[in-house]
Image: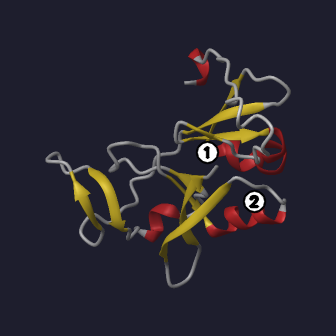
Amino acid sequence: MADSWQPFQVWWDEEEREKPKGDFPLFASNVMVGARAVEALEMSLQGNGELLPLLTEGSEIYLYNVTRVVDALNMEKSSGETFPSGRYMHISKHVFVKERLEGVEIFKLPQLYIGKKIYVTDSFMKRIEVAGLTGLIGEEVWSSDVGPKWQRMMPYS
């Protein structure tokens, strides 16, 4: 997507303009990343996706496009609502194949029909916390007996 990306103008509603935006402002359920977050997490972000610049007044903000897609979902042990095609609308119980996630920090699942769900390790969420970044919450969705806990990353406003 980065090869054909054309930055576009984004702005805040008049009522929201004076409120703090956080380091991960919400934009139509996509993750936007501010300059402080890019500085603190650049290696992880660049290694797993694309930072696509947006045009804004007074701040440097990127749309984050996760490009790492990992077929790590154990379909037999996971559950949720599916389409007739078998792809998930929503996953209520996540079970991952641990070996497929070795060395992976941020990813999406090919089994989700709408690929806006981003999965991250608990250590990635901890780095967000240590850096004092705001604007994201994590919801733990799976933990192996040994190894990282996986969380679904969600922006909040």
* Image coords of residue 88 (percent x, y): 28, 53
Q: Which residue appears at 73% of the width and 20% of the height? A: 55
Q: Which residue appears at 71% of the width and 41% of the height? A: 33
Query: Which quarter of the figure has residue 73?
Result: bottom left
Q: Which residue is mark 1?
A: 48
* Image coords of residue 5 (percent x, y): 60, 18
| In this rendering, position of residue 1 left or right of residue 134 | left
| In this rendering, position of residue 146 left or right of residue 90 | right
Label whose residue precedes the other's in the sequence (2 or 1): 1
Vertical comparison of 33 with 56: above or below: below
* Image coords of residue 66 (percent x, y): 56, 41
Query: Which one is closest to the eye, mark 2 or mark 1?
Result: 2
Query: Label 2 vs label 1: CA separation?
Result: 16 Å
Label 1 neighbourhood size at 10 Å, few (<14), some (14-19), many (20+)?
A: many
Tell me the kind of residue under disc 2: Ile
Q: Which residue appears at 27% of the width and 63% of the height? A: 80
Tell me the kind of residue under disc 1: Asn
- Secondary structure at numbered mark 1: helix
Which of the image's four quarters has the N terminus? top right
Vertical comparison of 63 with 132: above or below: above
Label 2 neighbourhood size at 10 Å, few (<14), some (14-19), many (20+)?
A: some
- Secondary structure at numbered mark 2: helix
Q: Which residue is mark 2?
A: 128
